[in-house]
Image: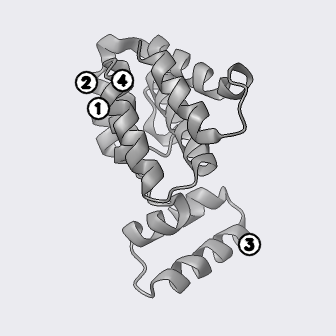
């Protein structure tokens, strides 16, 4: 996972490994995820996406608030969520798991979502990526919450 995050960069891998070992000498995937993603898990991103696709605005806002209140950096959340949506879209276009960083949990969920088509994921990806141009605020939390309200209506 560390190598995948570093995208082949040896120095980046070593730096991330050192951060993870500083956090906890017991190197586990959970500990690596806590250090590298601020505790934002793929399962959380999948849950948020599911809520959005089901137009459950209340639950999506509450989940995002939970993420925010846990101390996660909103700019990191934005980066991770864009990557997650991009990986979902790539998988739905190619049905090739190897070109994504998704887990089997996401693959299984996406395979069940086939009736929701790739177009929904493309639209979410484009909308989320363009969010900064649509909302005139420096507060990233307000920007994400406004986006959630917009896409869940």
| Mark toward the start of the polypeptide (1 vs 4) | 4
The CA distance from mark 1 to mark 3 is 34 Å
At mark 3, the secondary structure is helix
C-beta proximity under 8 Å, tags 1 and 2: yes
C-beta proximity under 8 Å, tags 4 and 3: no
Q: Is residue 65 left or right of residue 125?
A: left
- Which dot, 4 or 3, sits closer to the camera? 4
Reading the image, the residue beneath label 3 is 11
Reading the image, the residue beneath label 2 is 112
At mark 4, the secondary structure is helix
Q: Residue furthest bottom?
A: 25
Reading the image, the residue beneath label 1 is 109
Q: Which mark is residue 57?
A: 4
Front residue of 69 and 41: 69
Residue 139 can be seen in this image: yes
Front residue of 10 and 64: 64
The mark tally for this picture is 4
Name the colour scheme: one colour
User: Which quarter of the figure is the C terminus placed in?
Assistant: top left
| Mark toward the start of the polypeptide (2 vs 4) | 4
The CA distance from mark 4 to mark 3 is 41 Å
Q: How dense is the environment of label 4, judged by Cα within 10 Å: few (below 14), some, or many (20 and up)? A: many
At mark 2, the secondary structure is helix
The CA distance from mark 1 to mark 4 is 20 Å
Quarter-of-image position of residue 10: bottom right
| Mark toward the start of the polypeptide (4 vs 3) | 3
Residue drawn at x 59%, y 78% as measured from the top left: 19
Q: Is residue 90 left or right of residue 103?
A: right
Q: How dense is the environment of label 1, judged by Cα within 10 Å: few (below 14), some, or many (20 and up)? A: few
């Amino acid at each position: 996972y560390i190598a995948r995050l570093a995208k082949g960069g040896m120095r980046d891998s070593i730096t991330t490994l050192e951060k993870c070992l500083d956090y906890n000498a017991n190197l586990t995937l959970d500990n690596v995820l806590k250090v590298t993603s601020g505790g934002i898990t793929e399962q959380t991103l999948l849950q948020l996406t599911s809520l959005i696709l089901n137009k459950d605005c209340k639950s999506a806002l509450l989940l995002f608030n939970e993420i925010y209140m846990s101390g996660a950096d909103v700019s990191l959340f934005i980066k991770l969520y864009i990557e997650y949506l991009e990986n979902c879209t790539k998988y739905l276009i190619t049905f090739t798991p190897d070109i994504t960083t998704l887990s089997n949990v996401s693959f299984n969920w996406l395979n069940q979502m086939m009736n929701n088509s790739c177009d929904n994921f493309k639209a979410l990806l484009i909308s989320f990526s363009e969010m900064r141009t649509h909302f005139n605020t420096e507060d990233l939390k307000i920007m994400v919450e406004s986006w959630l309200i917009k896409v869940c209506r």
